[in-house]
Image: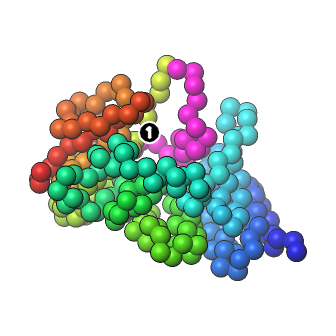
Amino acid sequence: MRNPRITSRYYGGLIRMIKIANHCHYHKVLARTLIERIAGFHCHDEFTLKIDDHGITLCTRIEKQQTCFTHSLTDPALLRRAQQKNQALLRACSNKKKTISTVADLTAGWGKDSLMLAFHGQQVLLLEQNPLIFECMHFLIELARYEQPDGCYQQMQILHENSLDYLQNRDPGFADCLYLDPMFPSHKSSAKPGKDLQILQRLTENQDIEELFELARQRAGQRVVVKRPLHADRLCGSKPDIVYAEKTIRFDVYLTRQV
């Protein structure tokens, strides 16, 4: 039996073509809802979004080459990485007393770090201001919840919010840990980042990241964690209280009201 397929074209908008190839009725309902919500989006670049039973594929042309990124929160490789217990991210966003249970990811992007935190038991709030990324991630979380109703996806909540505006309206301590993963500064190396980051860079930019960092230090219950390239300057020149380093990245930890 052929897969049900719907193709829609939006000229002059963000999405050039959307293809749906789903077996499951619930998947088709989610996919149709995603299409309806993004139909009027506009952007400088033209994107193609393909939706199937497992996730999405987002494509655009970067430097005259077609670049595609496939994303699913139930991808086995992504889940294997999330299962690893010794990740520096996990150490940075927790403490020995195990009193950090809520994390707000202020720069959610494709949600890979948030997935790892949720997999290890933390309640994670994802904030994403780009409407296309938000809608895609909302779709992927709902899809994952349907496929694995007892999984960690129940501990992930995503909001379409500007993080700076959101923090300005929150009381101090509303989340134990606030996590920032700003776009990495350009590097002299000619090596390109992964396709997921290339597409992310097309859609987002580091808006008010220094102001966001300073406000986060006022709002976090216990700590602010900032992801940086291993040899990059400290954000705002602020010395972290703790640093967890890996081969190419590090996590700078800034303790706040409670230690």
Q: Position of residue 155 (x, y in %)?
A: 40, 68
Outermost residue on the right side: it is 1
Q: Residue at x 52, y 56 (%)?
A: 79
Q: Quick check: 33 left or right of 232? A: right
Q: Residue at x 32, y 58 (%)?
A: 104
Q: Quick check: 216 left or right of 80? A: left
Q: Let me know if residue 252 appears in the view.
A: yes
Outermost residue on the bottom side: it is 25
The kind of residue tagged 1 is: Met
Q: Residue at x 58, y 38 (%)?
A: 194
Q: Position of residue 138 (x, y in %)?
A: 52, 66
Whether 41 is among the magenta residues is no
Q: Quick check: 140 left or right of 31? A: left
Whether 193 is among the magenta residues is yes
**152 or 193, nearer to the observer:** 152
Residue named by callout 1 = 183
Q: Position of residue 120 (x, y in %)?
A: 37, 59
Q: Let me know if residue 15 appears in the view.
A: no
Specify the quadrant that holds the N terminus: bottom right
Vertical position of residue 68 compared to residue 248: above or below: below
For residue 52, what is the image quadrant?
A: bottom right
Way the structure is coloured: rainbow
For residue 171, what is the image quadrant?
A: bottom left
Q: Quick check: 94 left or right of 256? A: right
Vertical position of residue 94 compared to residue 136: above or below: above
Vertical position of residue 170 compared to residue 235: above or below: below
Q: What segment is highlighted magenta in the picture? A: 189-210
**Element type where label 1 sits in the image:** loop
Q: Residue at x 59, y 57 (%)?
A: 75
Q: Position of residue 15 (x, y in %)?
A: 69, 56
